[in-house]
Amino acid sequence: MFVLGIETSCDETSLAVVRDGKKVLANVIASQNRVHQKFGGVVPELASRAHVEVIDSLFLKALRDSKITSREISLIAVTASPGLKGSLLIGSTFGRALSFASHIPLTEVNHLCAHLAANFLIEKDIKFPAVGLVVSGGHTNLFCLESRSKMKILGETLDDAAGEVFDKVARVLNLEYPGGPSLEKVAKKGDPLAIKFPCAYLGKKSLDFSFSGIKTSVIYYVKKYGSSGDIADIAASFQKAVIKVLVEKVRRAVNLKKTKTLLLGGGVASNRVLRGEMKKFALAEGIDLFIPSPILCTDNAAMVASLGYYLYSQSDQT
Ligand code: KG4
Ligand code: ZN
């Protein structure tokens, strides 16, 4: 079954064709980095316009890459929420129009669950229940996955998302947009033990997150000492603090759900230090860890198509 995935929730326009929820035949991604770079962050109106400009040609390219015709598409999966309203509207309108004109069923997909579904694109045996951590630019959530199509939120950020603090701290340090990857690069040269930034755990049992304290303390540190001499140390110490919290929250969720399966997803999951720390944790605890390849961690339509497939085939059975 060929599923067309459509993703336009933020600043990437992506269309993909995935066979049977697993095999990626096409995954075309147009990044809007150049559009937003000079503003230091995503400008919603410009994002919507940029989606409109490229969505038709990306659709045609996805068909070409996958060597199928539009008649062979059996299902359209489109990101419906969460995301920028105007941006989401472009993808869902495109999907609906195609669905209506070509009589193809359409499934709406939650963007955060789709980030975890990026792990379904690998041919591997995933045992459920599983714990899933989504770390993206707009969200930080822990999920319990009962199956590929049933996911429940266990915890979420009470203020900034993990990716958001990477982006904001990168801006304070005058690093290039997008901030997350720039900060990771600079942090490589720094000492993660140089500065102790505060980690918020919100009590012993909480599965929620709070990153605004770490962010504020980096801002104060930079104001007090200037950012000239030790940017790399600041970046490395900040990165370490965020990752420490993420690992601890995952540990709590895994213990609570008594599971031995952990899935990661979202743009921040492409961070090499985070991947390394999660691998260490999983190895020590005997947990099966799944992390998508970096290109499938950031926004893409293949993950949307995969989740759409599982949601649709599940609803067909019931
Ligand atoms: O999942 P995503 O592509 O879009 C959203 O759904 O938000 O995530 C984008 C976020 C941005 O905040 C970006 O700075 C962050 O992921 N990010 C990273 C890295 N690559 C992307 N953060 C830390 N280290 C990275 N290597
Ligand atoms: Zn995302």
Image (cartoon, helix red, strand yellow):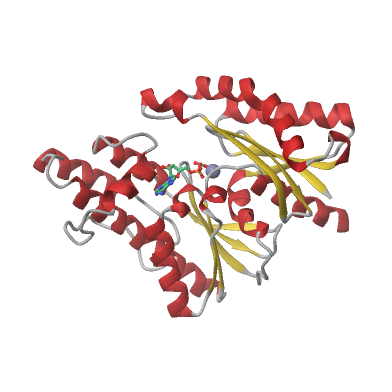
- Judge from the rendering whether residue 83 lies leftward or rightward of residue 57; answer left or right: left
**Vertical arrangement, residue 259 with respect to residue 83, above or below:** below
Whole-percent x, y for residue 257 in the image: 56, 72
Regarding residue 206, the answer to whether it shows in the image is no
> Nearest the camera: 181 or 258?
181
Regarding residue 81, the answer to whether it shows in the image is yes
- Judge from the rendering whether residue 318 lies leftward or rightward of residue 308; answer left or right: right
> Nearest the camera: 259 or 264?
264
What residue sits 30% from the left and 40% below the top?
A: 170
- Residue 98 sits in quarter: top right
Whole-percent x, y for residue 86 in the image: 59, 25
- Residue 58 sits in quarter: top right
* Residue at the far left in the pictured view: 225
- Judge from the rendering whether residue 148 lies leftward or rightward of residue 217; answer left or right: right
Q: Quadrant of the C terminus?
A: bottom right
What residue sits 75% from the left and 31% below the top?
A: 95
Whole-percent x, y for residue 199 in the image: 29, 58
What residue sits 52% from the left and 75% below the top?
A: 287
Whole-percent x, y for residue 294 in the image: 51, 52
- Residue 14 sits in quarter: top right
Q: Quadrant of ligand 2?
A: top right
**Vertical arrangement, residue 170 with respect to residue 38, above or below:** below
**Vertical arrangement, residue 40 with respect to residue 283, above or below:** above
